[in-house]
Amino acid sequence: MIEKPGSLWRERLASPLTWHYSGFAVLLVLVIALAVRFALDWAAISAHTRGVLEDRQIQYRALRIETEPLRGMDKRIDKTRGQIADFYARRVPANYSTILTQIGSLDVASGVRLSRVQYAPRPPGSNLPEIVMDAGLTGEYPQIMKFITSLERDKIFFVIRGMNLTGQQGGLVNLRLQVSTWLRPADAAASGLPQVPEQSSAVSPAAPAAQKGRPQ
């Protein structure tokens, strides 16, 4: 008996195997669609993540460059403080007696004669008070140059502010010398000497002078 085509299709549609194939095909299409969607989303997320990562890396490198000078700052500060303390200990005189002793030793070593030495501190500020010295030198030219050179190279921090030739007789030269050094604030205040105005380059003649060997 020959079956009709219509009844054959109905039997196939009613067959569980047909429904299994159909379900499998639908699931396969869904899986493929989800896989494509997942791949597209993953590509977009990856591109965004790479962009964000590159931005973060650029920011990190910029921060490293900006903070490079600050690295080890605490160690540099400690080193600077140590250098300042060492400078104070070696180059800043402890008192007026130290200044007098050193000037006297340079005087003897060079062969010049100090006719007078006047001292006066400038008004104290936020830093070390400046001590102004006005000295009269007499000696031969090589002796005076030796004294000045020794003064500039001395362990105590002396700064020559000015020199003025006041006379010459025979081989002797008379020179007026203005020199500055610095004391710690407490030592300068304890001197009791009058202050010289900041704008003045030399000790005022009217102010009481501390002669060589007098200040302590």
Image (cartoon, rainbow, N blue to C red):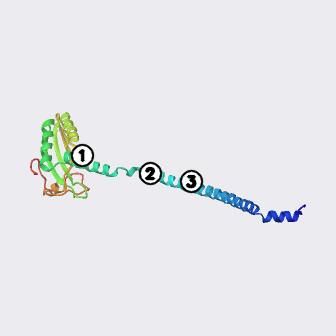
Q: Nearer the viewer, mark 1 or mark 2?
A: 2
Residues at circles 2 and 3 in contact by the CB criterion of under 8 Å: no
State the SS at label 3: helix
In this view of the protein, can residue 206 be seen by the observer?
no
Name the one closer to the observer, 169 or 106: 106
Along the line of sight, the residue nearer the viewer: 189 or 8: 8
Residue at image mark 3: 50
On the rendered structure, is 95 left or right of 52? left
Reading the image, the residue beneath label 2 is 64
The residue to which callout 1 is attached is 159
Is disc 1 placed on a helix, strand or loop?
A: strand
Q: Report helix, strand or loop for mark 2.
A: helix
Residue at image position (55%, 56%) is 52
Using the numbered discs, state the Cα–Cα distance from disc 1 to disc 2 in whole angstroms.
43 Å
Amino acid type at image mark 3? Arg
Q: Position of residue 39 (x, y in %)?
A: 64, 56
Between 102 and 210, the one lying in front of the other is 102
Q: Which is more N-terminal, label 2 or label 1?
A: 2
Q: Is residue 30 above or below residue 171?
A: below
- Vertical relation: 115 (above or below) 41: above
Q: Residue at x 69, y 57 (%)?
A: 32
The quadrant of the picture occupied by the N terminus is: bottom right
Gap in angstroms between the C-alphas marked 1 and 3 = 63 Å
Please state which amino acid type lies under the numbered disc 2: Arg
> To which quarter of the image does residue 163 belong?
top left
Q: Of the residues tagged 2 and 3, which is closer to the observer?
A: 3
Q: Residues within 10 Å of mark 2 (few under 14, many from 20)?
A: few
Left or right of residue 18: residue 80 = left
